[in-house]
Amino acid sequence: MSSTNRPLSPHLQVYKPQLTSMMSIAHRLTGMVLAFGLVVFTYWLYRVTTQPIIADQVSAFFSSGLGVVMLYAWVFTFNYHLCNGIRHLFWDAGKGYSIPAVYKSGVVVIIMAVIFTAAVFFLGK
């Protein structure tokens, strides 16, 4: 056997990112962001009952520019994770495995997440 310095499996230096792989990574990341957001929300609820002044400071932060951006991002991650989770349920049922269907459903997930996020903020005002 010859000795080569090649990686044994596709490596990030030679691997071309695809919609499917990027959406898989994004699904995992959005799950982590949602978990962190739940911790922040729980902290805020705890402070509402124990120290309303701190709860008001947290609310004021989420009314600032950076806070609003973080809220938009958190709502988008929720909607993306929800839509992609529904897509996974279809896969669990054995539907949509063909490559064109996978790409089509991926685009639909992204579009629906954007629409749902916009709806939350436009209808919530």
Image (cartoon, grey):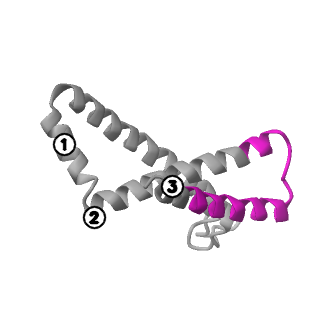
Q: Which residue, given by chain and number where applicable, does mark 1 sit on? A: 56
Image x and y of residue 19, in percent: 67, 66
Whether 102 is among the magenta residues is yes
Which callout, 1 or 3, points to the residue nearer the camera? 3
- 121 on left or right of 42: right
Q: CA distance from mark 2 to mark 1?
A: 16 Å
Amino acid type of the residue that numbered disc 1 sits on in the rendered structure: Asp
Q: Tell me, yes or no, whether the two marked residues, 1 and 3, touch with CB atoms within 8 Å.
A: no
Amino acid type of the residue that numbered disc 2 sits on in the rendered structure: Gly
Q: Which residue, given by chain and number where applicable, does mark 2 sit on? A: 65
The N terminus lies in quadrant: bottom right
Q: Which residue, given by chain and number where applicable, does mark 3 sit on? A: 123
What residue is at 36 percent from the left and 57 percent from the top? 70
What residue is at 60 percent from the left and 61 percent from the top? 115
Q: 95 and 43: which one is in front?
A: 43
Q: Which residues are magenta?
A: 88-116
